[in-house]
Image: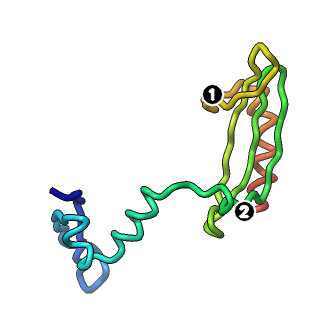
Amino acid sequence: MGIWLILKKYLHANDGSPNEVRTFQCDLFRDSFKYPPIVPYYKMAFGKFDKSLDKEIFSETIIFETTRITVGVFSYNDGEKKLQISRENMNQDGEWSFAKLGRMFKDEAEKVLPVMQKALKSM
C-alpha cells in the first residue's frame, strides 16, 4: 500500500474558463513518473529544515516588561521573502523562551505595526 493523493484536473474550454473538473487518485510512488510535479513537492514537504539556508533579511525586536516580539523577514534557500512575527516570554529566572504569538494587547500592536511596515519595505 502506498501513499495516495487526491488530484484534481481542470479541463478548460477554449475561452480559458473551467468547464469540467475530474478528481482521481494516484499512488505517490507507483504513479510518480506520470506526474513529475508531485515528487519535488513531496521531498520538500517532508525534508528537514536546514538553518544554514535560512537567510535573515530584516529583524527588529520590541521589548515589553515580560515579553518581547520580533518582526523579521526571511528567505529560505533564496526563495520568496516571508514575514515572521514571534514572541518570547521571560520566565521567573529571567530567561527568554519562545511562545505562540497569539493575541496582542493594544500597546503591543501599536508598537509592532510600524515595525511591520518597515519589514514590508525589505520584501
In the rendered image, which quarter is residue 33 located in?
A: bottom left
Name the mark on residue 82.
none
Please give left or right for residue 72 compared with residue 13 in the image. right
The answer to whether 13 is drawn above or below residue 67 in the figure is below
Label 2 or label 1, whichever comes before in sequence order:
1
**Local crowd at mark 2 within 10 Å, few (<14), some, or many (≥20)?**
some
**Local crowd at mark 1 within 10 Å, few (<14), some, or many (≥20)?**
few
Residue 53 percent coordinates (x, y): 65, 63
The answer to whether 21 is drawn above or below residue 15 in the figure is above
The residue at the far top in this view is 92
Q: Which residue is mark 1?
A: 103
| Quadrant in which the C terminus is drawn | bottom right
Residue 9 percent coordinates (x, y): 23, 71
Labels 2 & 1 near each other (Cβ < 8 A): no
Q: Image point 35% across, 70% down: which residue?
A: 39
Amino acid at dot 1: Arg
The answer to whether 96 is drawn above or below residue 81 in the figure is above
Residue 90 percent coordinates (x, y): 76, 22
Q: Which residue is mark 2?
A: 123
The answer to whether 96 is drawn above or below residue 39 in the figure is above
Residue 26 percent coordinates (x, y): 19, 66
Please give left or right for residue 83 compared with residue 20 in the image. right
In the rendered image, which quarter is residue 42 located in?
A: bottom left
Q: Image point 64% across, 29% down: which residue?
A: 99
Q: Image point 23% across, 57% down: which residue?
A: 3
Amino acid at dot 2: Met
Which secondary structure lies at badge 1?
loop
Q: Image point 84% across, 20% down: which residue?
A: 65
